[in-house]
Image (spheres, helix red, strand yellow):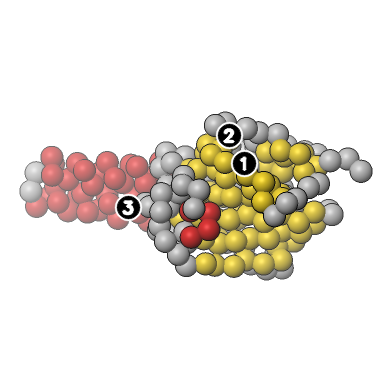
Amino acid sequence: MVVDGIYYGLSFAAAGGFVTYLTKPVFGLPLFVLAAFCLYFFRDPDREIPSGPVAVSPADGKVVAIVPISGTETRVSIFLNIFDVHVNRTPVAGTITSVVYQPGQFLVASREEASQVNEQNTITVEGEGTRVVYKQIAGIIARRVVCWKKAGDQVTLGERIGLIKFGSRMDVILGPEWDITIRVGERVAGGSSVIARRRSG
């Protein structure tokens, strides 16, 4: 579990206990429910990371778009609802060359324009002859994107890199050396679902 979940859970549980003490248990119940939800939301299960020349999903969620951009690149967009695991993982191994924060709007994260105008962190990883860009994008409920990495850090395939609090979106931009292996509408698991394979040669 991410430590944030413990903090939120304890805070809501303490508030529920205080309200129950001052009034009746029924009035404290919603706070206890929120405490339980926070413990559930901030779960961080281990995942079996695949091997080989693959890119893995950076998050749990539903693939909402696979869009060609810039002529040779493809953007894969994954929408996370509030019930998905919100710990994010790097889709490829390599060196993080940049982490750029962009303030912005909080549109519904499943909308196409959210990729450009919403608050987000853009992370670039280079290694093994490829350069992959991925974005942590806040949504209408998610109001904070958290990246635990910085430029210069080495990351392994599927390694945890950050967290988006509550409903949100992640985009992955892949170059022409990648073959996309998923389709719009599929559900994926962060760190374990293969979203693309490197072309040989």
- Circle 2 or circle 3, nearest the eye: 2
In the image, residue 97 above or below residue 62: below
- Mark 2–mark 3 Cα distance, whole angstroms, equals 38 Å
* Residue contact between numbered discs 2 and 1, judged by CB atoms under 8 Å: yes
Q: Residues within 10 Å of mark 2 (few under 14, many from 20)?
A: few
Query: x, y (%) of residue 132?
Result: 71, 54
Tell me which residue sits at (17%, 53%) in the image: 18
Q: Earlier in the sequence, mark 2 or mark 1?
A: 1
The answer to which of 161 and 27 lies nearer the viewer is 161
Separation of marks 3 and 1 at Cα, in angstroms:
40 Å
Q: Dot 1 corresponds to which residue?
A: 66
Q: Dot 3: few (<14), some (14–19), or many (≥20) neighbours within 10 Å? A: some
Q: CA distance from mark 2 to mark 1?
A: 7 Å
**Element carrying mark 3:** helix
The three-letter amino acid code for the residue at tag 3 is Leu
Residue 40 is at least partly visible in this image: yes
Instruction: Judge from the rendering whether residue 118 lies leftward or rightward of residue 159; answer left or right.
Output: left
76 displayed left or right of 52: left
Residue type at mark 2 is Val
Is disc 2 placed on a helix, strand or loop? loop
Q: Which mark is residue 49?
A: none
From the top left corner, tell me how far across and down residue 87 is, in percent.
Answer: 53, 48
Q: Label 2 belongs to which residue?
A: 184
- Numbered badge on residue 10: 3
